[in-house]
Structures are given as C-alpha cells and as structure tokens.
Image: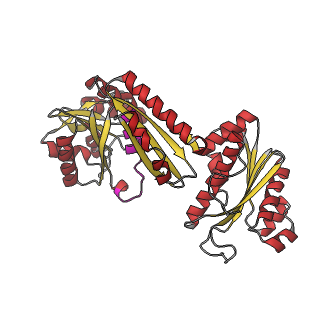
Amino acid sequence: MKGEIIAIGDELISGRVLNTTSTFAAARLLEAGHEIKRITVIGDEPDIIDECLHASLKRAAFVLISGGLGPTSDDITNEAVARALGLRLVENAHITRKIREMERRTGHKASRTFKEKLSMLPEGARLLNPDGCAAGYELDYEGVYLFFLPGVPDQLKDHLVKRVIPRLNELDPRRREIRQKVFRLFGLTEMEVNERLYDLYELDSGIRIGYYPVFPEVHLSITVKGEDGPHVDEVFEQAVAKVEAEFRADIVAMDGGTLEATIGELLMEKGLMLSAAESCTGGLLGKRVTDVPGSSAWFDRSIVTYSNRAKMEELGVSAKTLEQYGAVSSQTAREMVAGIRRVSGTQCAIAITGIAGPGGGTPEKPVGTVFIALSVEDEIMVHRFLFPGSRHEIRSITSETALDWLRRYLAYGSKLPGYRFES
C-alpha cells in the first residue's frame, strides 16, 4: 500500500524539535512493503490540518497522522480532524475508565479539560492499544485508512511497530516485495559513486539507487521492488554484491551502523585498545567513540590537549619541537601520538592537531590544515591534510578521516587514509 505521513506540531515547523519520527516511520513501513510517497510537516492550525488531510485522502491508501493528541490546549488534532471530516466528537468510554482508574490510584482529580482532550475522539475511532497509556487510534474514511499516533517518539514507534504495521499487513496481504540496504561511504564524492554504478540498473528494472550526501559521508541506498519474492531476493543479492565489490574499502558501515561501531568490532576482533589525543577537534573523536554502547571494552581514553602547555604536560611533547615546528606540524602530531600511547598503554592511538578556523591560518598553514598521526603496534604514520569548510565542518571531517584511517588499517592494512591528503 502507498501512504503519506502528516506530522503536526508548531515545535516541528519552528525548528525547536527535529522530526525524526517521520523518517523512522517511513523506513519501517518500507521494510514491511508499504511505501510512503509524501511527508508533510505542519503546525497546529485547524485550516492547514483540514487542507493537508483532504489532499492526502485524494492520493493515498493510508495516512499516518502524528502529534496533537495530548491533553494541553495546543493539542487540537482530534477537534480539527472531526471538523475537517464532518464527524462528531464522541466520548470513548474505555479512555474515560482509564482516567478514573488513574484518579483513584493517584488520589489526584483530573481537570475537565484533561478528560475531554483525551477521551473525546472522532466518531468511528478505534483505539490502537486499549491497554496502553498513550492515545492512538484508527479511523476508516471513504476507503482510506487513517492512523492517528502520538508525537512522542517512543510512543509513536511502539504504536507503529506493534499496531499499525501488523494492521496494514492484514489490509494488504499482497503488498509488493521490497528489499533495501543503505551503505555509508567515506572518501568519495556523490558523483564518483554515481559514475561507478551506472551499469547497476542493467540488472533489473526494479532497482532504485539513491545518493544522499550526509556530511562528511555519502549514503547510498539500494532498493529492489517487485511482485515475485524469490526474484526480488536474487536481484537484491546481486546488487548488494556489486556495491560491496566496487566500494569494498570505502564502506564504513551499513544500514543503521556507524563508522565508530565498525572500528569497535575490528578492535575487539584483534584484541586491541584505542586511545586518542585531540587538539583542534576538542574531544569530538572521543565523543563519537563513546556514543557506541560498550565502547569501554575497546576504548581507553581521549585527552584534549588544546594548549601547548597541555601537550607538554599531558603527552610529553617537547618544548623544542613546539618552538621549532609549531603546534600544527607533523613533528608535534608524531610526539602527541607517541605520548598518548605511553600514557594509556594502548596498542592503537590517534593524535590530531590543526587549525579549524575561522582565524589562525597563515600562508604556510592556512585554515583547514590538519595533521593526523596514527599508531598501531610499533608503527607511527603521519599525514598532512587541507580540509575545506567551516569550523564545524573541518572538525567533523577531521574526526571522520582519523577514524576511517584506523578502520582501513585494521581491515586492509592500508597505511594511507582514504581521504585525499597533502603530504
């Protein structure tokens, strides 16, 4: 079935809250064979809700509407939808009983507004989860299935996975077979990836290829659709094998994985521990690594040595090196990585020193000049980079390059980073 999503909430259109729930819903629905053709984000305005809802009813077989189901005055979805569809708001006896049970249990009497907001639903509404605390209901309108879900991410995800998708599967047992895989690449441009996959379409007309620059990576999605499950599986396997062969060393992760998690798996396989010394990235590399659950099994520490004094006191970088070559130099990066290895006792280490800008550059060392040192076992490698972009972008691509270089070394023995560099 082909559907649409309408996400309602002033907080979404003002930018205060990122609309992650719609992308989650679209991905999970696609996995189940239900395609989302449009996602619309609107504010809490009855006229706009009316307009968008009627437009979706003309195009879609089902519509997912999220947000605006709570007990506060700005939660107007139920009222707006009832008005738009010409339906009465009627009391849902089950919700009323749940509210009374809550009042007895807590000893706190709910306000009239609270009760009405939660219990008054458009006529014909069927609760998705009668035993749950969060509101959510289904409504059939002129052959289109409408699913109203809470905007709270955890509640929406629970309703979607446990209630909505099984219901859609019942309604459309002959849905199309869909397979999808997302590859996260680093070190190549979007155009380079595109040019190397021209012949992939020749495998089958059901193949769709998507290219998505998600700085500093390029995300490549391979989707195969069709009516015949075994044929879809065969084409999908061929397409995935082609991508893996073409971009073997450039794939940092797949699907929901991350570069940091990939590195953790490699370090665990080899029984190695990692440490880091950061200057211009200010702890960004350490944050990325420690965002991975269980990373303490393979990551020891990251020391932010921003000043020259910190480099000398924490890592043993010599004053002579700093005076002669400067903090941003291959010599300093080499001593930093040796120092963090010595302090931490780890077998692997990364050191970063550079100029993230916007000031501080010189003709010899412009903004974006970064030296990364990688040490694994008895080897130390250092390279000079000149990264483009803003301060945020330079720091981001620096941490990505450092981690990717370690990945390439551990997986393929590569002594050269994947990102183009100046030596």
Percent of width and height locating residue 127: 28, 30
Q: Looking at the rendering, in which quadrant would you find the N terminus? A: top left
Instruction: State the image quarter where residue 267 is shown.
Output: top right
Q: Please say whether residue 30 is one of the residues in the magenta stretch.
A: yes
Instruction: State the image quarter where residue 16 is shown.
Output: bottom left
Position of 13 relative to 93 (above/below): below
Percent of width and height locating residue 118: 29, 40
For the point 62% across and 40% down, the residue is: 262
Residue 26 is at least partly visible in this image: yes
Q: Is residue 369 left or right of residue 8?
A: right
Q: Is residue 291 left or right of residue 50?
A: right
Percent of width and height locating residue 171: 26, 25
Type of colouring: secondary structure
Q: Nearer the viewer, residue 293 or 370?
A: 370
Q: Is residue 134 left or right of residue 58?
A: right
Q: Nearer the viewer, residue 275 or 329?
A: 329
Residue 107 is at least partly visible in this image: no
Q: Please say whether residue 317 is one of the residues in the magenta stretch.
A: no
Predominant SS along the magenta part: helix
Percent of width and height locating residue 214: 49, 52
Instruction: State the image quarter where residue 95 is shown.
Output: top left
For the point 21% across and 54% down, the residue is: 48
For the point 57% across and 50% down, the residue is: 186
Q: Is residue 44 left or right of residue 301?
A: left
For the point 53% across and 44% down, the residue is: 184
Q: Looking at the rendering, in which quadrant would you find the C terminus? A: bottom right
Position of 18 relative to 141 (above/below): below
Please give the range of residues in magenta: 13-31
